Amino acid sequence: MNKAFFILCIAIMSQFNSFSQEQLNDYKYIIVPTSYEFLGKKDKFQLNSLTKFLFNKYGYTAFLENEDFPEDLRNNRCLALTAELIKAKGGLLKTKVRFDLFNCDTKLVISSKIGESREKEYSKAYNLALRDAFKTFQEFSYVYKPNEDIISKGSKRIEIVDKGDVKAKEEIERLKKEVEALKAKEKVVKTKPQEVTTEKEIINESVIVTEDGNLLYAQPIKNGFQVIDTEPKKVMILLNSGVPNTFIVKGKDAIVYKKGTLWIYSENTGSNLKSETLNIKF
């Protein structure tokens, strides 16, 4: 009886591992955050760097979230899973952690086994526990197999308003027109600076260029991105507009759009249209 039960457990575990690996094979990349929430500081104990190293060592393609991504990943974040290291509960004399991998909709795709360590020194304990937890992914025979549903997400437009919300749609269209008008004014000023009427048109327009040191990072969230600075502190929330490289700023009468290689913040202040060049790394 015990032998039969043991064999059944082994069979169930094997089937679960096979299913988990198939899910993992649907994703081309792994994104590793620069800091883990329960530790706070950036790359504390070098755990984030270690996570990236281990994924790459065992056949995955991993990037830290502040690195330059391949073009397909920049265009479609759904090709990647985001790795989070979670501090597990229990064990007075043990350090316990596990990995949770989330998709672009922040849904949990797979969790690792709980890694443990009895080391007393935190840096060693977390390092060993992380490596122990990572054995889950180390044992998989990972091979990327493109999933059409995931790939197609990059080309689908994400609706951020209900179809019945006409006012919201009209507001989006109004902001788009204001941005186009601003672009047209800038073009006229550059080509015809001698025209007095054109200069009067833009006299109330302020253009501010962000210093290179004020680097911002865009972290993917549901329906858009959370923009943080280097502290890190949340600066703004960008919501998908349904137009490529154009986002609506949550809580503001403003949008962020891409012009050439630059990201432009454009806000209607009521009396004028303010533009600001942002140094955002997506």
Image (cartoon, rainbow, N blue to C red):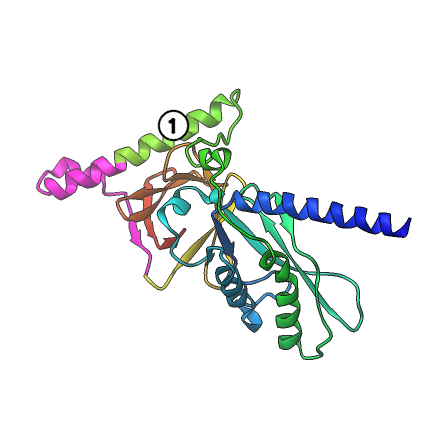
Answer above or below: position of 228 versus 213.
Answer: above
Task: Tell me residue 212's x, y (percent).
Answer: 32, 61
- The answer to whether 169 appears left or right of 186 in the picture is right
**Residue 275 shown left or right of residue 154 in the figure:** left
What residue sits right under mark 1 in the picture? 173
Residue 196 image-quadrant placement: top left
| Boundaries of the magenta span | 182-211
- Does residue 92 sit above or below 76 in this rendering? below
Percent across and percent down for residue 233 are 51, 58
Residue 56 pos. (x, y %): 48, 60
The answer to which quarter of the image holds residue 200 is top left
Which of the pair 190/149 is nearer the observer? Answer: 149
Q: Residues within 10 Å of mark 1 (few under 14, many from 20)?
A: few
Q: In the image, is residue 198 part of the stretch drawn in magenta?
A: yes
In the image, 157 versus 174, the foreground residue is: 157
At x 66% / y 68%, what residue is drawn?
Answer: 129
Taking the spot 10% from the left edge, 38% from the top edge, the residue there is 195
* Residue 243 shown left or right of residue 77 in the figure: left
Q: Residue at the location (50% across, 54% down)?
A: 31
User: In the structure shown, which secondary structural element does the residue marked by tag 1 occupy?
Assistant: helix
Q: Percent position (x, y) of residue 111?
A: 66, 52
Q: Residue pushed farthest bottom?
A: 121
Left or right for 26, reference 184: right
- Residue at image position (54%, 41%) is 222
- Amino acid identity at mark 1: Glu
Nearest the eye: 17 or 243: 17
